[in-house]
Amino acid sequence: MLHPVKVLAAALIAFLAWNPMVSAEVREADVCIYGGTSAGVVAAVQAVKMGRKVMLLEPGQHIGGMSVEGLGRSDIDNHEAFQNSKAIGGLALEFYRRISARYGVQEQFDEMVRQRAKQTTLWRFEPHVAEAVFDSWLAEAGVPVLRGHRLAEANGTRKDGARLVAVRCDNGVEIQAKVFLDTTYEGDLLAAAGVTAVVGREGNEKYGETKNGIRADTTHGQFDRRIDPYKVPGDPASGLVFGVQDGLPGSCNVDLYSAV
């Protein structure tokens, strides 16, 4: 006759082996945000302001996304939108205000905002300064940040019907939440949860627009001089340098999106 304790232990082992969502650590939150980009930081801060318990997951070790990877000069350099409207406000403006405080120029920044003046340098920042602002902002808001928590490639999500109820990281940690936000650049959580998503530009015909798809007739960001495309300058037989495509770029009606 089998001992009941041994039977129970065997059943538990079988269950753990069968259920990939069982992990060594389970954490709970009202809102789980996957992706420590600038969007993830702002979403986390805002959710806390709304009285929610928040958890921010980042696959890597740095918070801030492109803002801490070198994009310290943004499109605010085109100041018509800023001067003629309140295009930048809310937590985005607060981020820039905190940046100015780090540089000791918050008074000048606030005066610029009040006057809607054009002072390009006050909108620029170094990556390490942006990261320091994001880190201190999250700490101030009391947001737990789980660095090095990458969504598991296999069985990384658990759903109750169509509703996502838990995610599992490749280190075994499971996070259960009422709401999940995907703030990655690639839509990793959306894909894992089976949500249809669009990456890139859709063709003009998709929504009857005219400024998307492949654009070869713009003046923004075009070269004003000839650049040799060959590995050996002037020698077509040497082949094209990396990233250069032979032939026409395509049509505005071509879809450049992928649906997951």
Image: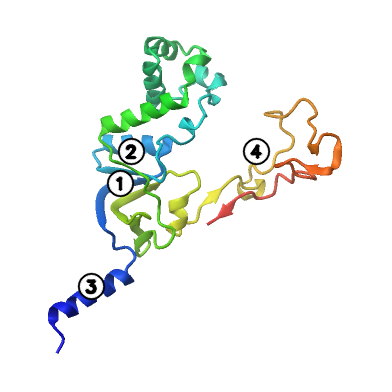
Residues under numbered marks 2 and 1 in contact, where contact means CB atoms less than 8 Å apart: yes
**Which residue is the site of mark 1?**
31
- Identified at 49% across, 32% down, the residue is 69
- The vertical placement of 195 against 45, above or below, is below
Bin the neighbour count of mark 3 within 10 Å (Cα to Cα): few under 14, some 14-19, many 20 and up: few
- Identified at 74% across, 37% down, the residue is 216
Q: Secondary structure at mark 4?
A: loop
Which one is in front in this view, the residue at disc 2 or the one at disc 3?
3
User: Gap between marks 4 and 3, in whole Å?
Assistant: 58 Å
Q: Secondary structure at mark 1?
A: strand
Residues under numbered marks 4 and 3 in contact, where contact means CB atoms less than 8 Å apart: no
Which one is in front in this view, the residue at disc 4 or the one at disc 1?
1
* Dot placed on the residue nearer the N-terminal end, 3 or 1: 3
**Which residue is the site of mark 2?**
44
Query: Which kind of residue does numbered mark 3 sit on?
Result: Leu
Q: Secondary structure at mark 2?
A: helix
> From the viewer's perspective, is 21 left or right of 242?
left
Q: Which mark is residue 211?
A: 4
User: Gap between marks 2 and 1, in whole Å?
Assistant: 8 Å
Q: Secondary structure at mark 3?
A: helix
User: Gap between marks 3 and 1, in whole Å?
Assistant: 30 Å
Q: State the quadrant of the N terminus.
A: bottom left
- Residue 248, percent across and down? 79, 44
Q: Which mark is residue 12?
A: 3
Which one is in front in this view, the residue at disc 4 or the one at disc 3?
3
- Identified at 74% across, 46% down, the residue is 250
> From the viewer's perspective, is 254 left or right of 194?
right
Q: Which mark is residue 128?
A: none
